[in-house]
Amino acid sequence: MNRPVICFACCVFGLSLSAQPGSAASCESLAGISLPQTTVTMAQTVAAGEFTAPAGRGRASAGNPYKDLPAFCRVMGTLTPSNDSSIKLEVWLPASGWNGKFLAAGNGGGASAAIQGSINTPALAAALRGGYATAATDTGHEGATLNFAIEHPEKLIDFGYRAVHEMTVKAKAIAAAYYGEGPKLSYWNGCAAAGREGMMEAQRFPADYDGVVVAAAANYWSHLQPWSLAIYEATHKDEASYIPPAKYPLIHKAAVEQCDALDGVKDGLIENPRRCKFDPKVLQCKGPDTSACLTAPQVEAARRIYAPLVNSKTRSEIFPGLEPGSELGWAALADGDEPSLYVRETFKYMIFKDPQWDYKTHPVNFDTDVPLADKLDNGTVTAADANLKPFFDRGGKMILYHGWTDPLIPPGDAVNYYKRVEDTVGGAGKIKESMRLYLVPGMNHCRGGEGPDDFDMQPVMEQWRENGKAPQQVIASKVTNGKTERTRPLCPYPQVAAYKGSGSTDEAVNFVCK
């Protein structure tokens, strides 16, 4: 950021510090910074290796996972953009060696639940280790509940999009005061709920970030949660429909055996599940129910899990189904005594506004209740707007990636969004200038699974945004107990990794994207 912009920022935000553009302020002096609707509650230098997280915020049971952190300036505060807002903020600023960039720490992706009101300390630490200025927010509430949504609409707006935007603007201003200049570039990198937040930023506030990396985004919230309920109902329609988790490996094995070799390589992975026409009926019992077969109702339940949820009247797709290969993770949504926490919270507090709602006593009508969810949400939490032109026009880049075997959020939703953006910006040629999608065979939700799940999209993004080097293939590895077992190229959609015909199928060099 150049000096005229910094001066403008100081005027706009009313910085009361004496530091001028190009001159740094002490960490402790940031306690006196004056920003609209902002109260700084702490500004403190943390010595190298001295940070320990508060209870419940990423503290390991044995030892301190943050002992390797460099010295940094830690700023805490509360943001109040509305009379009913109370958004907690943390900003971490490297005391030395700042790379001149800002990398936000979102919520989700394994660090916290999708609706958990807490500061994502592990993500802050990861960004700090990389030399970035970074910040996080609790999105304006505490605890894994949306119970505030009924009587506190302003807090729902904070949770949906305002808290992250306010965090971003205020963190950059604090960084500018501390360093004497603001970040040259700003990045977002997050999975699941953090992916939703990043997509919302690009859609609503295109000037906040220069590059957004999104994995397995929970962005289509008003359709994702009804679909999640439909998955649960598939195996709880009645007692006969229930598929014991002990049978998941049976289904998985059959799906892989049928579809593994479709890409010309038998490696235990389904490269492109969309080519797989697996029907669980091949496992239907020919006699009594046993652990080696599926009953007819169980076959039907499995079919419903693979199939998209559709409106029964219009036949339009509400949300895509899970893909063949995802079976080992079905318990996350299809098993248990009740639907997932996110489903319950969404229907209770955001859709029906009834804390006593229960899926058994108040069944969901997907034909009418999904449109109701869309109407009530109206883009507050759902980040499905395909018009990324304002973001792209100012040079913004977006990378999406999703595991084909994700059992929580179907990868088909990422494909659908990519195609909608493609149509909006003017076709395949245009979208490739600003957006790429990578689908990872055998990868589960964010990470994990049988496929190559070890890779880093952040340097890929920075090469693209800063040096104009558009991403092509990205090399991913499968690492077990510290040993690399396999490497494979990840290809930009719609390309897939194709075996060249010779050499080890465990080495990426023997594959080409086409």
Image: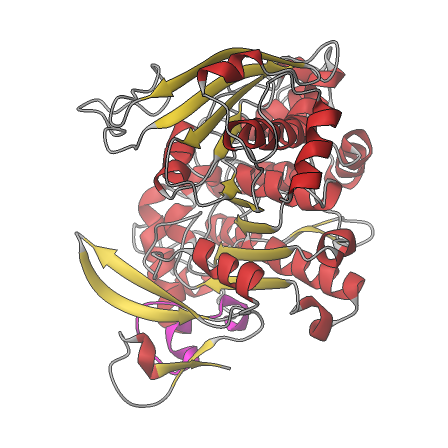
**Can residue 460 be seen here?**
yes
Q: Measured from the top left, where is residue 318 in percent x and y?
A: 71, 48
- Give yes or no for residue 267 being in the magenta stretch: yes
Of the 4 image quadrants, the one containing the N terminus is top right
Question: Is the image coloured rainbow, by chain, by secondary structure, or in one colour?
Answer: secondary structure
**For the point 65% across and 40% down, which residue is it?**
3
Q: Is residue 126 above or below residue 409?
A: above
Q: Is residue 463 above or below residue 154?
A: below
Picture quarter containing residue 2?
top right
Q: Magenta residues?
A: 259-276
**For the point 24% across and 33% down, which residue is it?**
68
Name, please, the residue furthest toward the bottom: 501
**Can residue 289 be seen here?**
no
Q: Is residue 353 above or below residue 392?
A: above
Which is nearer the eye, 99 or 114? 99
- Give yes or no for residue 328 being in the magenta stretch: no
Relative to 308, 56 lies left or right: left
Q: Measured from the top left, where is residue 456 in percent x and y?
A: 40, 55
**For the point 60% across and 42% down, which residue is it?**
198
Q: Measured from the top left, where is residue 239 in percent x and y?
A: 48, 35
Relative to 356, 486 lies left or right: left
- Label total for image: 0
Q: Measured from the top left, where is residue 217 in percent x and y?
A: 57, 46
Which is nearer the eye, 241 or 189? 189
Which is nearer the eye, 358 or 386? 386
Picture quarter containing residue 425?
bottom right
**For the point 65% across and 63% down, which residue is it?**
434
